[in-house]
Amino acid sequence: MRLISENNGFTGEQTLFLKAFISGLQQGRDLPHLGQDDQGRFTHEPEATVHGTPVDDLCREERIKHEKNGLDCYDTILNNALENRFPEADDVFRYKFHGLFYVSPAQDSFMLRCRIAGGALSTHQFRGLAEIAQDWGPGHADLTTRANVQIREIEPKNCPDVLMKLSELGLTSQGSGADNVRNITATPTTGFDPHELIDVMPYARAMHHYILKNRDLYGLPRKFNISYDSGGCVSVCADTNDIGFYAVRVPENDLGVEPGVYFRMQLCGITGHKQFATDCGILLTPGETLPVAAALIRMFIENGDRTNRNKARLKYLVDDWGLEKTLVETQAKLAFPLRYFPLDACEVPRPKDKQGYLGIHPQPDGKNYIGICTPVGRMSVSQMHALADIADAFGRSEIRLTVWQNLIIPGIPDERLQDAITAIAATGLDHRNHHLTGGLIACTGSRGCKYAAADTKAQAVALGQHLAGKMILDLPINLHLTGCKHSCAQHYIGDVGMMGTRVKIDDGSTVDGYNIVLGGGVDDQQAIAREVWSNIKASEINGLVEQLLCAYLAQRHDGESFASFTHRLSIEELHALVDTAKLASAAA
């Protein structure tokens, strides 16, 4: 600016103009939308955004994804393996795109989470997973509440071998963690359920492969769940998913829709936030479910909240927009019109058989499936090999996983049932439907998860053993123990649900404990459980549940389920069923 003066030969008016012009250029250098080319000329640079959200406003995880897509960190996995080194900083999050979870400080190792379309595995694949658990894991595997398999205690040096082995088995872990579409679930008995309306496995598999083949579907604001219910006897908890496709039969009608089997679309299930998916008024042919789901996911990718992780699920976008706008924006991405059809014009779906995934059940082809209880989902390698042998020898070389942490072996002829049952018993597992332990579900817990406040798996097993030694129930109940608010074990849908917490004791330290909710259910028994007790020490839960179930047996109406019993009582009346002073003395 000193060069511009009256001595330059400019008039006073010209000097003032030039001073103002150059001052504006200098201020413009600091603006985010201006830059300079290699010759010093100013150029326009639009502010960087992610689907319209300025980069500066993104939450931490969104910035990590913006800087480098998690799918592109395989070189990092290979390099870290060479030195047996764990990922650092942002790469911990990116590893999850490959299904590898660094679970420190609970364990100084990785947990592998697979993707298993519809929960269906060949015996070859099941044995391969056992080999991974044996060669690079802890000698056991865990079944999850998304009909999936997790293997823990994997070292960094073995991660490439694990991922390659999965691929060679025809499996993958891609996108099984972080902000991606998770394992696609399907009715575990589909294809051999005599009461189902349609075999949904082809559609679950098609959805699975569509997601794998489309890179843009790995850019969600948060995780996303999709499930197919065949209309059969066994629940897949489809109403706990972001999208739940429910098979229905449409009878003769005057609404212009051909009679037949269709799918209703339910949206925004997220039971950790106390919400089930609800019907959105849409009726789809089976072939329309995939493009509609893809359109809805892409709409969510473009419009979901990327600034606040607590508001980044589909539910919150629909809460903000309303259902009508959500469907209009989805329609804009489709080549065919959405079909609106009233729910009450469809036939009422049949009720679910609670714990119908256990025991011996007939198939339409004259054979049988056997549901096997794997306590809290944990199986040893030897049990896995034995189960694969049983499925080969007596079944059709297939194993189905359930969202209840159990498994099914289909295709067993009548004349081989007893041999199969004997072989199952030899593994240490049980096919019988024990009403107390058949619905016992637990997340990983504090031994393997940094978020968990309690050792859920061990405490769930101890609870089941205690109750089995004290009583016999004539109606099934589900007991769900989850370690934290993420609710991986879906405590809000359990007859008895427990969420881990730390309970302070007299010396000021803390011990494992639970907040206890009662009366949850899904499908035709849908209900969000109510919290009845809080901060109960883990050492006291066996006695509390025992007293509660004894009161239920003594005071229920004829044929009344446990959930119905708890629904008709107030919180105060439920409190009165348990003597908490006796709990403390028994625990001591």
Image: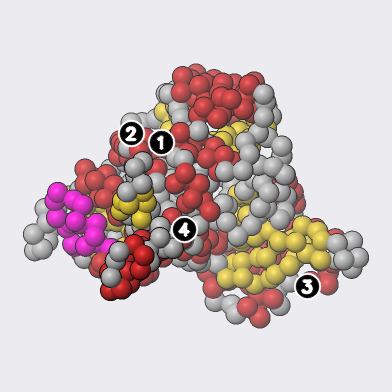
Nearest to the eye among marks 3 and 4: give it.
4
Q: Which mark is residue 213?
A: 2
Please give the range of residues in magenta: 326-341
Q: Secondary structure at mark 3?
A: loop
The residue sitting at 63% across, 78% down in the picture is 571
Assign the N terminus to one quadrant of the image.
bottom left
- Can see residue 122? no
Name the residue type under label 4: Asp
Residue at image mark 1: 117
The residue sitting at 29% across, 60% down in the picture is 348
Say left or right for 199 vs 335. Answer: right
Residue at image mark 3: 579
Image x and y of residue 236, in percent: 43, 48
Image x and y of residue 584, in percent: 84, 67
Report, in whole angstroms, how far the alpha carbon at label 2 lies from the one at label 1: 14 Å
Nearest to the eye among marks 4 and 2: give it.
4
Question: Mark 4 or mark 3, which is nearer the start of the sequence?
Answer: 4
Q: Secondary structure at mark 1?
A: helix
Q: Are marks 4 and 2 in contact (CB under 8 Å)?
A: no
Report, in whole angstroms, how far the alpha carbon at label 3 lies from the one at label 2: 57 Å
For the residue pair 432 and 408, the one nearer the viewer reads as: 408
- Can see residue 316? yes
Nearest to the eye among marks 4 and 1: give it.
4
Residue at image mark 4: 56
Assign the C terminus to one quadrant of the image.
bottom right
The residue sitting at 65% across, 72% down in the picture is 532
Nearest to the eye among marks 2 and 1: give it.
2
Say left or right for 371 vs 219. Answer: right
How dense is the environment of label 2, judged by Cα within 10 Å: few (below 14), some, or many (20 and up)?
Answer: few
For the residue pair 368 and 326, the one nearer the viewer reads as: 326
Dominant secondary-structure state across the stretch colored magenta:
loop
